[in-house]
Amino acid sequence: MPLSEQEQRLLEEMERSLYQNDSDFVARVTRRQGRPSYTSITLGVLAALVGVAIVVLALAFKQPWLGLPGFVVMLAGVLWALRPGMRMPKSGAKAPRSGGSSKPTRPSSSGGSFMDRMNERWDKRNDHGQQ
């Protein structure tokens, strides 16, 4: 069931408010979410299968000392396959910011990470385009 116009406006207003007032929380939550990396899943499953093969070979040749590294490889492969995706959200996923921000922006030449500076430049560009 689609949202009414009033509900859509209210939802957009709530999103803008969240992005302005609690941008640190939004950044943390957005980083944790993401699509799975199929390369990581494939490599993790392959590593787990190699670990299982090492454990089976250790049992077949009666070499218990070889079972421990096999188990470690198997466990590392499973953890690698299950780790969360680290992709950034699509550029359209971020809600537009309105002109009245409660957080002062610092100049691009000051400290901070490269991505912070790029985000500030993007926000400034979007703010100028809306006026």
Image (cartoon, rainbow, N blue to C red):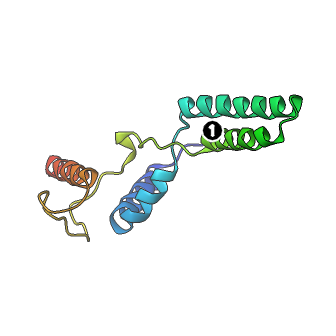
Mark 1 closeness class: few <14, some 14–19, many ≥20 residues within 10 Å: many
Tell whether 124 sits left or right of 31: left
The type of residue carrying mark 1 is: Ala
Tell whether 54 sits left or right of 16: right
Residue identified by numbered label 1: 81
Q: Residue at x 28, y 56 (%)?
A: 97
Residue 19 position within the rendered picture, expressed as x and y whole percent measured from the top left: 37, 60
Q: Nearer the viewer, residue 77 or 85?
A: 77
Residue 10 visible, this orientation: no
Residue 4 visible, this orientation: yes
Residue 83 position within the rendered picture, expressed as x and y whole percent measured from the top left: 59, 45
Q: Nearer the viewer, residue 24 or 102?
A: 24
Q: Nearer the viewer, residue 126 or 88?
A: 88
Q: Nearer the viewer, residue 55 or 40?
A: 55
Classify 24 as above or below 63. below
Report the quarter where the N terminus lies: top right
Residue 7 position within the rendered picture, expressed as x and y whole percent measured from the top left: 48, 55
Q: Residue at x 78, y 42 (%)?
A: 65
